[in-house]
Image (cartoon, grey):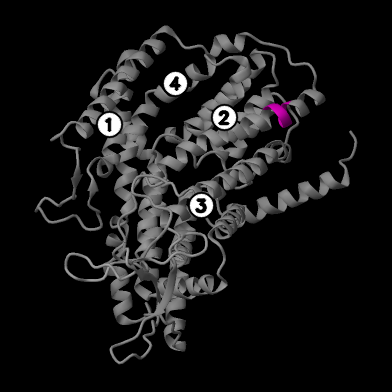
Amino acid sequence: MSNPAPSQRSSATLLDRLERIGNSLPEPALLFAILAAVVVVLSAIGATLDWKVQPTLPKLLTQPVLDAAGQPAMDSSGLPLVTPKLDERGQPIVALVGQTDKEGNPVHLRPKSLLTSDGVYWMLSSMVRNFTGLPALGLVFVSMLGIGLAEKFGLFGALMRWLALMTPKRLLSPMIVLIGANASVASDAGYIILPPLAAALYLAVGRSPIAGLAAAFAGVAGGFGAGIFPTAADGFLAGVATQAAHIIDPAHPAVDATHNIYFKAASSAIIMLAGWFVTDRIVEPRLMRASPSAAGDTSAITDLALRPIEKQGLIWAGVVALAVLGAFAAAILVPGAPLQGLGQPTLASGAPAPGERAGERWSQVIVPMIFLTFLLPGMAYGRITGVLRTQAHFIEAIYHGIRTIVPVLAIAFFMGQFANYFQYTGLDRMLAYAGGSLLVQADLPVPLLLVLFVLVVVLGDFAMSGMLSKFGVLAPIFIPMFMMVGMSPELTTAAYRIGDSVVNIITPLNSYLLVILVALQKYKPHAGLGSLISLMLPYSIVFGIAWTGFLLLWYLSGFPLGTDAPLHYLPGS
């Protein structure tokens, strides 16, 4: 056997070093526990050294509206009408104004130490509340009840196989990538089912099975932040983003679970086109040059074909899904129906629900819609296929969804402590004001900030895996800072999706890399982690460039990112 070339040895050494560094980091739950401890220590140090920061709040600059005669126009109460001042790019101008007291003296924030009698009491007395009060907790829990049941009964697996098997050979790549980009709704099923399925399909039609494996993995992992359907992760991101936005604007409305739904749906098309290009123009030609013969194996199609009972189950699941969606559509569109018009969520007492915004009624019930849209079709599929026969099967499927988020719940407990410690000490606001002021003074254009933030998240992905846990660390820092330069929390979250997704396919910290490696070794027995990463690297590069460019174009278009999801943050709006 020949020795590897120096470039191959150095690249393998670098990858090995990255893997060792990543593996040496604590697990996410433990990491948040450590971060919470760091906040405790910093609060005591800051209080002792009298750290202080002057709050500088963003203020929308306005100018008077002039009438036809050039005089200031007045409203019905006799007050002058004003309109936002715009910069040369046509965007509202936001300036920072330092807070002062009644005498005009600067007001300063100072950290509150947790290593005091009151601080220790607060940590102990608020421990449970810090966890149960997380805005994302209920969203994730309820969504996964329905999604987990549908996954347990096999609906997602059958649907993926049906879509892949019915696709013409020349459209196999875009369909596989598109299915993968939407597989995040099925939790881990996309990683387990789609890559081996795609490899077998490619082999069966005379194409390189490794190309099929790569296309599927690229869609599932590289396009994880895209997708047509809302997921439980969207609710988690929305909750964390809301909490981060309240650091500098406590009155900021809650971020909807569908805050990026328009951008996500369009992004799935971008990922599909980019994955199609890389698979058919870069990856597969290279593989075919290395191994020109790709013998067809029609037995793969036979093994993966749907049984008649599964086809019948899919039909009935589709009928039930259409009925559910039709019922929701009627409830939204028919005058006087429950979800028609505007509404304000309330508590059982009739008081307005804290943190909930008034708006379109249908946008306030997205999570129950997700729950029923997956629960009822999943039950129909399970009933037809015989998987759901007794109430015990139903309950077991419900439990399955909850089991899949147990790690998330454990992470959420410690993340709740970290986030609330950060808030109690005031260090969150101090960091946001200091960092935001620096960004305003730097006067960097928003498109450049978006690109830089994507790169920050990309680099972070080599040190910390997990979409949700990484966002829990970054959101309290970057969302308030970017709000001070006019970027909405929804826009920051959209950029985060890109940076988190595009390197999922090459970071050694992705636990599913080993699952995909096992599937790859079926067709390339001596393949190692370096082989897999080099196979996926073109996807990572092209996805990163294309998706970031798409976000910049979206930003320039001014189109909202989702329901009640503006691009810009305007103070007091």
| 391 lies left or right of 462 | left
Task: Please provide the residue range marked out in magenta.
Answer: 280-284
Which one is in front, 169 or 194?
169
**Quadrant in the picture for the N terminus:** top right
Q: Residues within 10 Å of mark 1 (few under 14, many from 20)?
A: some
Q: Are marks 3 and 2 in contact (CB under 8 Å)?
A: no
Q: Of label 4 and label 3, which has the lower sequence position? A: 4
Secondary structure at badge 4 equals helix
Q: Are marks 1 and 3 in contact (CB under 8 Å)?
A: no
On the image, numbered disc 2 is attached to which residue?
A: 177
Residue 168 in the image: x percent, y percent? 58, 14
Residue 496: which disc? 3
User: What whole-number distance in Å separates the C-alpha atoms at marks 4 and 3?
Assistant: 29 Å
Residue 66 in view of the camera:
yes
Residue 342 in the image: x percent, y percent? 20, 45
| 454 lies above or below 121 | above
Amino acid type, mark 1: Leu
On the image, numbered disc 1 is attached to which residue?
A: 372
Q: Of label 2 and label 1, which has the lower sequence position? A: 2
Residue 434 in the image: x percent, y percent? 48, 76
Q: Quadrant of residue 194?
A: top right
Q: Are marks 1 and 4 in contact (CB under 8 Å)?
A: no
User: What whole-number distance in Å separates the C-alpha atoms at marks 2 and 4?
Assistant: 15 Å
On the image, numbered disc 4 is attached to which residue?
A: 159
- Front of the two marks 2 and 4: 2
Residue visible at 46% across and 82% down in the picture: 45
